[in-house]
Image (cartoon, helix red, strand yellow):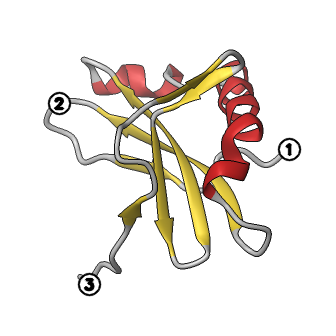
Amino acid sequence: MVFAPVRLAHPCPRVKTPRGEVDLIARRGSRVAFIEVKWRKRATDLDFAIDSYRLRRVAAAVEAIAHRYAGPQDSIRIDVILLAPWRWPRHIANAWMP
């Protein structure tokens, strides 16, 4: 497997706003991904870790901060990464599509 390099657009994880928070911001080329990370102790709990309420809060936070990280020609998406011990991470690309 070959992975293209990803650059973190923000040096510190978790950007908080009054409307919500974003755990990671990454850039690859002209694509900026605002990433929500959920960790659960049991893999079975990951199915319920993210819901429409939580995604709406992330989307609201992205609306508030996107202008700082993405230019007018950049594409923006909201991804989710689900983590549990002894499991491969699950990546949900473009999890929020209003």
Determine which residue is flagged by label 1: 98
Q: Residues within 10 Å of mark 3 (few under 14, many from 20)?
A: few
Taking the image as shown, residue 54 lies to the left or right of residue 41, namely: right
- Tell me the CA gap for discs 1 and 2: 31 Å
Residue shown at 58%/61% (left/top)? 32
Residue shown at 65%/50% (left/top)? 68
Q: Are marks 3 and 1 in contact (CB under 8 Å)?
A: no
Residue in the foreground of this view, choosing between 68 and 43: 68
N-terminal label among 3 and 1: 3
Determine which residue is flagged by label 2: 85
Q: Secondary structure at mark 1?
A: loop
Q: Which quarter of the rendering shows the C terminus?
A: top right
Q: Secondary structure at mark 3?
A: loop
In front: mark 1 or mark 2? 1
Residue 48 rendering spot, x and y as whole percentages: 52, 21
Taking the image as shown, residue 22 lies to the left or right of residue 12, namely: right
Residue shown at 49%/65% (left/top)? 27
Determine which residue is flagged by label 3: 2
Which amino acid is tagged 1? Answer: Pro
Which amino acid is tagged 3? Answer: Val
Residue in the foreground of this view, choosing between 50 and 34: 34
In front: mark 3 or mark 2? 3
Residue shown at 64%/47% (left/top)? 95
- Tell me the CA gap for discs 3 and 1: 32 Å
Residue 72 rendering spot, x and y as whole percentages: 79, 68
Q: Which quarter of the rendering shows the N terminus?
A: bottom left
N-terminal label among 3 and 2: 3
Where, by quadrant of the figure, is residue 62 drawn?
A: top right
